[in-house]
Amino acid sequence: MTNIANHALAINIDLHLEMNTFYNFSGSPKAYIDDDKFSVYLFDGTPVAWLSDEKLYAYSGKFLGWFLNNWIYDKNGNPAFFTENAIGGPSKPMKGMKPMKEMKSMRPMRGMKEMASMKPMRSAIWSNLSNVEFFDQ
């Protein structure tokens, strides 16, 4: 490969990695979407949720919220996390440095999906659950 092709590939990889990181209200990176495009992990390797269409579920099957315009919204429509390409929502803080991803633990079996709530109006007020506790609700 040429140097230009290597550089373009590196930029593309960086953009991909940036797009799958979830940052909280203070810009702290808290979780990421795995390369499979649906599994959500904490940086310590703990699997915490999965995406199904626009919905986010805990592995127990509990409905956690919505993934819309690269934002995770809680059940009340308040933004909890954003990605690099998030559109709309409250103003985004400066993003903190991402920690190293630790080895991933095995994903648990998925529980039966809880019925999702109706999609609420989206708010510009940050969720009180804009931290790893979001995934434990």
Image (tube, rainbow, N blue to C red):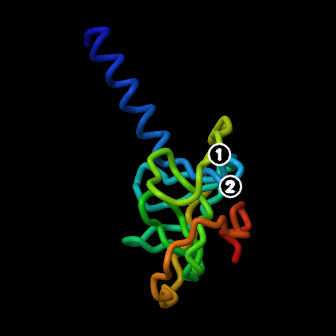
Image: 114 above or below 106 = below
- The reply to whether residue 62 is in sight is yes
Q: Residue at x 55, y 51 (%)?
A: 32
Q: Please give the residue where the numbered disc 2 appears in the rendered image.
A: 25
> x, y (%) of residue 135?
66, 69
In depth, the one of 125 and 56 nearer the eye is: 125
Mark 2 is on which residue type? Phe
Mark 1 is on which residue type? Pro
Q: Residues within 10 Å of mark 1 (few under 14, many from 20)?
A: few
In depth, the one of 55 and 61 nearer the eye is: 55
**Which mark, by number, is residue 93?**
1
Q: Is residue 71 left or right of residue 36?
A: right
Q: Quadrant of residue 60?
A: bottom right
Residue at disc 2, secondary structure: loop
> x, y (%) of residue 49?
56, 67
Q: Residue at x 69, y 49 (%)?
A: 44
Image: 49 above or below 60 = above
Q: Is residue 90 left or right of residue 130?
A: left
> x, y (%) of residue 90?
58, 58
